Image: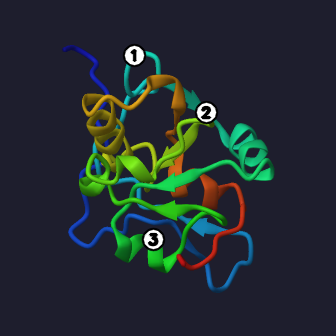
């Protein structure tokens, strides 16, 4: 395709989660070279949300699911999130609420872990209206200066 825009090539030693700058409070370093950019709509009928919707969801005490593997979750997650790693999503379907929607997130817009979890749950018959997708993930959460905590 003429005039096609190309991403920066992957670095050899990339990092998936943004890192706070030690010398400049409020500055976060982002590695833009890893992963595959995910679509805004992960699946038909699944609504993609942003940070304000996620914050309102948390204030209500509704479920937020960190779909990343436990090593990432244990290091840092969105406060109040529970960990259901994407490879285990379908097997752990009974742990999800069916009365209120759950928000699924992973490392960010270039991470395929929450999309994989969502697709597995839909294939297993989980109701589409009970799934919300936070595409920004921990990547956008951190770059906006929002808090994280170690996984519990």
State left or right for residue 138 relative to residue 143: left
Residue holding disc 2: 49
User: SS class of the residue under badge 2?
Assistant: strand
- Sequence-wise, which precedes: disc 1 or disc 3? 1
On the image, the x and y values in percent for residue 6 come to: 28, 34
**Contact (CB < 8 A) between labels 2 and 1?**
no
**Contact (CB < 8 A) between labels 1 and 3?**
no
State left or right for residue 112 relative to residue 82: left
Q: How many circles with numbers are drawn on the protein?
A: 3
Quarter that holds the C terminus: bottom right
- Sequence-wise, which precedes: disc 3 or disc 2? 2
User: SS class of the residue under badge 1?
Assistant: loop
Q: Residue at x 48, y 49 (%)?
A: 105
**Contact (CB < 8 A) between labels 3 and 2?**
no
For label 1, the crowd category at 10 Å Cα-Cα, with few meaning under 14, some 14 to 19 and many 20 or more, is few
Q: Residue at x 39, y 28 (%)?
A: 42
Residue holding disc 3: 73
Alpha-carbon distance for marks 1 and 3?
27 Å
- Asked if residue 40 is positioned above or below residue 3 in the image, the reply reads below
Residue holding disc 1: 44
For label 2, the crowd category at 10 Å Cα-Cα, with few meaning under 14, some 14 to 19 and many 20 or more, is some
On the image, the x and y values in percent for residue 19 come to: 53, 73
On the image, the x and y values in percent for residue 97 come to: 54, 44
- Asked if residue 14 is positioned above or below residue 75 in the image, the reply reads above
Q: Residue at x 75, y 48 (%)?
A: 55
For label 3, the crowd category at 10 Å Cα-Cα, with few meaning under 14, some 14 to 19 and many 20 or more, is many
């Amino acid at each position: 395709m003429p005039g096609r825009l190309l991403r920066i090539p992957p670095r050899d030693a990339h990092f998936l989660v943004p890192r706070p700058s030690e010398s400049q409070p409020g500055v976060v370093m982002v590695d833009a070279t890893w992963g595959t950019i995910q679509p805004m709509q992960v699946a038909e009928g699944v609504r993609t949300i942003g940070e304000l919707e996620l914050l309102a969801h948390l204030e209500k005490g509704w479920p937020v699911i960190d779909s990343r593997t436990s090593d990432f979750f244990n290091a840092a997650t969105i406060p109040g999130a529970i960990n259901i790693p994407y490879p285990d999503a379908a097997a752990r379907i009974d742990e999800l609420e069916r009365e209120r929607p759950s928000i699924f997130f992973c490392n960010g817009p270039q991470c395929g872990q929450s999309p994989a979890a969502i697709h597995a749950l839909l294939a297993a018959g989980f109701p589409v209206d009970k799934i919300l997708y936070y595409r920004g993930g921990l990547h956008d959460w951190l770059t906006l200066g929002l808090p994280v905590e170690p996984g519990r």
